[in-house]
Amino acid sequence: MKKILIINASPRVGGNSSRLADAFIEGVKSSGNKVERLELRLLRIDPCIACDQCFSKGKPCVLNDDMDQVYQGIEANEIIVFAMPLYYYSIPANLVAAINRLYALWSHGGYPKRQVVLLIAAGDSAPDTFSAVDTTWRKMLSHLEWPLLGKVYAGNVNDLGAIDKTEYPAAAKKLGASVA
């Protein structure tokens, strides 16, 4: 049984990337895996202040916000799923803040070994819609040494619920079932 953390960066309740995460969770549960979900829209995560005092107060970061929930989730799970909308062909600010704060883990002996799944929804339908963010994720994951298990990049799904009329939720569910 795999333990999986979904970090959902969608600010919209029931947004298209959230629906991808829902479908992925269906697949995960169908194969008997355990899943935990963090909604970044409900958390206050401040940006890294580059103080280099990581772990000096007995926890990964000296900032007093909700990032400890992310650290605990990463510690407790083997697979990390990032679900997000594409904002200006990049990663939304709330997720960037959380990713930047992973530095605290590096400063204390290196990153834990994890695997990653990406679920990204975008309103744009151009063939190169995901090229910049894909390059960014691949470089980040290489640095973290976290292999990419799979991804669903869902284009042309701007309106709330538009994803429900596509094949993307089925692809996310299938990917969720395959991570066992």
Image (cartoon, helix red, strand yellow):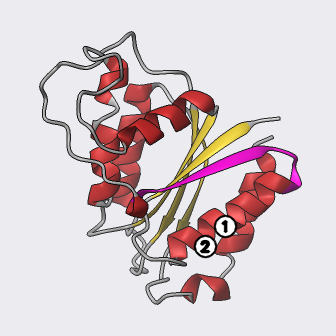
Number of numbered discs overlaid on the protein picture: 2
| Residue contact at pointers 1 and 2, CB within 8 angstroms | yes
How packed mark 1 is, by other alpha carbons closer than 10 Å (few <14, some 14-19, many 20 or more), is many
Residue occupied by mark 1: 22
> In terms of image quadrants, where is residue 170?
bottom right
Specify whether residue 51 is in view. yes
Q: Position of residue 9 (x, y in %)?
A: 42, 60
Magenta segment boundaries in residue numbering: 30-40
Residue occupied by mark 2: 19
Question: What is the distance, in whole Å, between disc 1 and disc 2 at their CAs?
Answer: 5 Å
Of residues 13 and 95, the one nearer the viewer is 13
> In terms of image quadrants, where is residue 66?
top left
Q: Position of residue 96 (x, y in %)?
A: 29, 49
* Quadrant housing the C terminus: top right
Q: Amino acid at mark 2?
A: Arg
> In terms of image quadrants, where is residue 123?
bottom left
Q: Which residue is at 80% across, 44% downward?
A: 33
Q: Which residue is at 63% across, 34% downward?
A: 77
Q: Which residue is at 46% across, 90% downward?
A: 159
Q: Which residue is at 31% across, 61% downward?
A: 92
Of residues 41 and 147, the one nearer the viewer is 41
* Quadrant housing the N terminus: top right
Report helix, strand or loop for mark 2.
Answer: helix
Instruction: Please give left or right for residue 125 compared with residue 117 in the image.
Output: left
Q: Is residue 127 above or below residue 105?
A: below
Asked whether 32 falls inside the magenta stretch, the response is yes
